């Protein structure tokens, strides 16, 4: 029986997802990609999970595509075709993160390289340690970014800096990552998971539906005109206003107490 490459535990409303291939720095093979996609879809539909933390076992977050996994390389005649691998393996994985109706935090416990960097960037927030490194490593082996990096990187750090990071493939160290907006929070190495979980538990106690709608509205707002953004705000506000959490928030405000949100 194959060992699981992704391990899920649920505590206090937080789904903690661990990438579990530490011997290869949590490099992504077919099994990991499929198990992680399935796990993300599972927690998305689980009402007990109201926030998610994604991290890696061992010394790394994720070193990207497992270059020893030949299933990632499709041959057509004498030519290598990587497009289908990206479409079938990585695109569904990143889409599963974007489809989450609850917040997801990457606890980046070391290197996040190539598709592993993309994986971290696709999360809503990133908590890192002093030894964390982000590496858009694709160019180092003659490839262009995939797994959403071309989408997320310029939105986080701006166009010019994104081009420079992706074209050079250089390491972005922890302090720079926080300074340029690639990461949200810097934690001591032995406190990383504690701080990521504390943030996740704080979010898990919030109005989950409203937080999910916030995520959708902000991403959509980056793609639309002001008129379209204003209209979509009206759409999501209509949905948020029909939740039990909204009623609880209003009632708690009137009673001058902390709201007890249930994610409904």
Image (cartoon, helix red, strand yellow):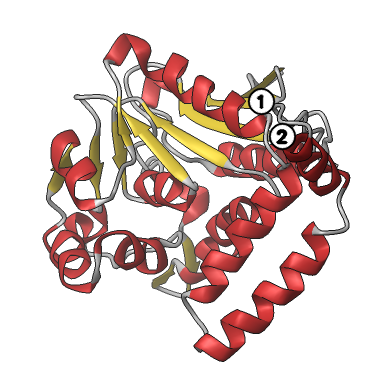
Whether residue 5 is visible: no
Residue toward you, 82 or 19: 19
Figure quadrant of the N terminus: top right
Q: Which label number is shown at residue 14? A: 1
Bin the neighbour count of mark 2 within 10 Å (Cα to Cα): few under 14, some 14-19, many 20 and up.
many
Q: Residue 69 in the image: x percent, y percent? A: 45, 42
Q: Residue 170 in the image: x percent, y percent? A: 12, 50
Residue toward you, 91 or 71: 91
Dot 1 falls on a residue whose secondary structure is strand
Kindly identify the residue that appears in the image at 62 percent across and 63 percent down.
Answer: 216
Q: Residue 122 in the image: x percent, y percent? A: 47, 52
Determine contact: label 2, label 1, CB under 8 Å.
yes
In the rendered view, does 204 fall on the left or right side of 174?
right
Bin the neighbour count of mark 1 within 10 Å (Cα to Cα): few under 14, some 14-19, many 20 and up.
many
Q: Which residue is mark 2?
A: 50
Q: Would you place residue 262 above or below residue 129 in this image? A: below
Dot 2 falls on a residue whose secondary structure is loop
Q: Residue 42 in the image: x percent, y percent? A: 78, 39
Whether residue 25 is visible: yes
In the rendered view, does 150 fall on the left or right side of 139?
right
């Amino acid at each position: 029986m194959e060992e699981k490459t992704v391990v899920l535990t649920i505590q206090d409303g937080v789904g903690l997802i661990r990438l579990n291939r530490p011997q290869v720095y949590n490099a992504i093979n077919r099994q990991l990609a499929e198990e992680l996609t399935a796990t993300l879809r599972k927690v998305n539909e689980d009402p007990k999970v109201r926030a998610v933390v994604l991290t890696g076992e061992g010394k790394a977050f994720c070193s990207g595509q497992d270059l020893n996994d030949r299933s990632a390389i499709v041959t057509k005649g004498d030519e290598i075709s990587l497009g289908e691998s990206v479409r079938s393996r990585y695109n569904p994985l990143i889409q599963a993160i974007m489809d989450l109706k609850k917040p997801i935090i990457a606890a980046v416990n070391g290197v996040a390289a190539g598709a592993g960097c993309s994986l971290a960037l696709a999360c809503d927030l990133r908590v890192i340690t002093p030894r964390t490194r982000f590496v858009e490593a694709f160019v180092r082996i003659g490839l262009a970014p995939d797994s959403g990096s071309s989408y997320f990187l310029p939105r986080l750090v701006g166009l010019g800096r994104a081009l420079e990071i992706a074209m050079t493939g250089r390491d972005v160290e922890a302090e720079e990552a926080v300074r340029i907006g690639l990461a949200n929070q810097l934690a001591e190495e032995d406190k990383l998971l504690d701080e990521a979980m504390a943030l996740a538990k704080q979010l898990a106690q919030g109005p989950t539906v409203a937080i999910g709608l916030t995520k959708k509205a902000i991403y959509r707002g980056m793609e639309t005109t002001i008129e379209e953004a204003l209209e979509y705000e009206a759409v999501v506000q209509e949905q948020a206003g029909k939740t039990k959490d909204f009623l609880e928030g209003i009632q708690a405000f009137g009673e001058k107490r902390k709201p007890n949100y249930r994610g409904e």
